[in-house]
Amino acid sequence: MAVPANILQQVQTYQLSALAFMQNLNCFVSTANTRFKEFEQLVGNLGDTVTFDLPPRMTTTASLVANFQPANQRVQSLVCEQAASASYAFTSQQFIFNVEEYMERFGKAAVKEIGAQVEANVALNCVTNTYRFFGDGVNPINSYTQLANALALFRNYGSASMNLKGYLQDTAIPNIIGTGQNQFTLDRNNETANSWELGKFSNCEWYQSNLLPVHIAGTEGQNNSLLTVSAITQNAAGEITAITFTGTLNANDPNSVLQYDKFQFQDGVAGQPNVRYLTFVGHKTSANHVQFAATANAGSNGANTVTVQITPFLQAAPVYNQNINNQIQVGMQVRVLPSHRAGMITAGDPLFLAMPRLPDQAPFYTGNEIDEDTGVSIRMYYGATFGQNQMGMVHDCIWGSTLVPEDAMAVIFPL
């Protein structure tokens, strides 16, 4: 491969400036759970997987007579399936006369670019691994009151008591700060005004990001459609795994519902009970509306009907995985969330990230380091193409991330 058309300067025509690199807010990488230290130290390859356990779920019987229930070991897998690289090459003359003293700057630029790709990919968990959400995608989230309401619902469902974190859109922070300073709490106002950061509020550490993922909804979401349940699909355990709706905007629309679209059951539907999630532990009726996400694209048919595969499965029977207070019935209605940008709230460090060390690229010089600014583990190798007057540098990494859905709730910002 030929050396690309580099844009280089003669050494005598420029001086190294003190300009800093433009930074992204890499809060997801820096706060993710990297508990699998041994996994990161091992030499890894794409497709490597580690499995971790989730807390078992139980049910109780209002009697001293034992009612033995099946023991279910719950697990979740983290797959190292992502890769990114940045590379550049020079002729020997270019290296000696133009860039030998400049290589650190090229290297930093490559690492920061890769770091942004890793951060944005990890942030996708806000969309892909959440089913509960706060916000309607229409009205902005711009006040401490809204954050307090989001935290109340998050805790009401049940949550770990430690390491509560919230990830918000950076452009929403000024308005949130402004509402806090309108309150008569002088000490906190002074502290907030001096820092201009949200920091800790209601025992939750808040972070801001300029790389929150955007979810583009299907036709029903883009039109804020109100859909009506016409049928349900259940598995052998009685869990609802799919719901068929009528009332789609268009017939024969392949984009009626897109993967990760989010839905909420509506209150006050004539002849239908309101449905609520049960607390995750204890199975008591919570204040949380029943919300769910589509796990696959779904097209409408000629009768304006669409069947949506859902997560989580919905179970009304009194068993260990019961999660709703009333069975889903024909005639109930849901509203589809529009396109949006998603942050999230988590507790108990459920966002896992693994970046195993890549193998040496013999016979080329190879090094593996962790970038202090981005928290990204990166390999660099370099060498010359024999007889071709070409020196190449490659920075690359592999990683995988996952989020435990029940320990997270999306925070929805309008586009």
Image (cartoon, helix red, strand yellow):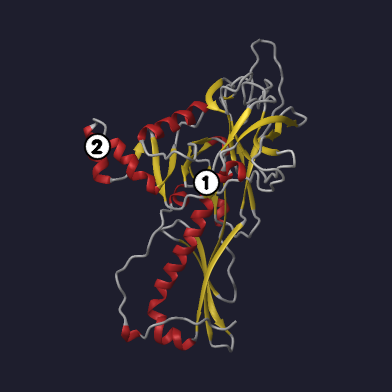
Amino acid beneath label 2: Asn
Q: Which mark is residue 189?
A: 2
Q: From this viewpoint, is residue 347 visible?
A: no
Q: From this viewpoint, is residue 108 visible?
A: yes
- Residue 163: give x, y in percent of width and height: 44, 37
- Seen at 70% across and 14% down, the residue is 66
Q: Which mark is residue 96?
A: none
- Seen at 57% across and 27% down, the residue is 266
For mark 1, give the secondary structure.
Answer: loop
- Residue 164: give x, y in percent of width and height: 44, 37
Q: Give whichever of discs 1 and 2 has the lower sequence position.
A: 1
- Seen at 49% across and 54% down, the residue is 119
- Residue 40: give x, y in percent of width and height: 55, 54
Quadrant housing residue 257:
top right
Q: Which residue is mark 1?
A: 35
10 Å crowding of disc 1: few (<14), some (14-19), many (20+): few
Disc 1 from disc 2: Cα separation? 37 Å
User: In the picture provided, is 410 more to the left or to the right than 188?
Assistant: right
Quick check: 128 above or below 380? above
10 Å crowding of disc 2: few (<14), some (14-19), many (20+): some
In the image, 25 versus 172, the foreground residue is 172
For mark 2, give the secondary structure.
Answer: helix
Q: Nearer the viewer, mark 1 or mark 2?
A: 2
Question: Given the current orientation, which residue lies at the most extreme right position?
Answer: 236
User: In the picture provided, is 325 more to the left or to the right than 69?
Assistant: left
In the image, 252 versus 181, the foreground residue is 252
- Residue 58: give x, y in percent of width and height: 63, 24
Quick check: 395 above or below 13? above
Amino acid beneath label 1: Arg
In the image, 21 versus 63, the foreground residue is 21
Quadrant housing residue 361:
bottom right
